[in-house]
Amino acid sequence: MVAIGLNSRQEVDEIVNAAVANGATQHEEPQDHGWMYQNSFWDINGHGWNVMFADISQMPTE
């Protein structure tokens, strides 16, 4: 699986939606952890992609 970080939740969904529109398969429902958001898909060659955004300033300290 390949993971990439983006600058916003919107960018994450745009990438995953574009991939799915072009033949990829949604891997699972998006995961929203408050400070971190991720979405994922399998591309047409079977490679897994985890696309995420993390707002470090909102990360829990404990």
Image (cartoon, grey):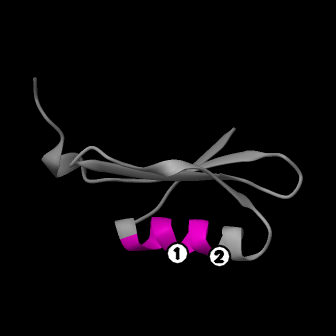
Residue 31 relative to residue 5: left or right = left
Mark 1, residue position: 14
Which image quarter is the N terminus in?
top right
Which image quarter is the C terminus in?
top left
Q: Residue at x 48, y 51 (%)?
A: 29
The magenta segment: 10-17
Q: Name the residue type under label 2.
A: Ala
Q: Residue at x 23, y 48 (%)?
A: 35
Q: Residue furthest left?
A: 62
Residue 38 relative to residue 32: left or right = right
Residue 45 relative to residue 52: left or right = right
Q: Which residue is drawn at 89% across and 52% down?
A: 45
Numbered mark located on residue 18 in the image: 2
Q: Which residue is drawn at 69% across and 69% down?
A: 19
Regarding residue 52, the answer to whether it shows in the image is yes
Q: Name the residue type under label 1.
A: Glu
x, y percent for residue 32: 31, 49
Please tell me whether residue 32 belongs to the stretch shown in magenta.
no
x, y percent for residue 33: 27, 43
Name the dominant secondary structure of the magenta segment: helix
Quarter-of-image position of residue 7: bottom left
Q: Which residue lies furthest to the right in this view?
A: 45
Asked if the residues shown at circle 2 and circle 1 are in contact, with their CB atoms under 8 angstroms apart, the answer is yes
- Asked if residue 62 is positioned above or below residue 50 in the image, the reply reads above
Regarding residue 8, the answer to whether it shows in the image is no
Please tell me whether residue 14 belongs to the stretch shown in magenta.
yes
Which element type, helix, strand or loop, lies under badge 1? helix
Numbered mark located on residue 51 in the image: none
x, y percent for residue 50: 58, 47
- Asked if residue 60 is positioned above or below residue 10 in the image, the reply reads above
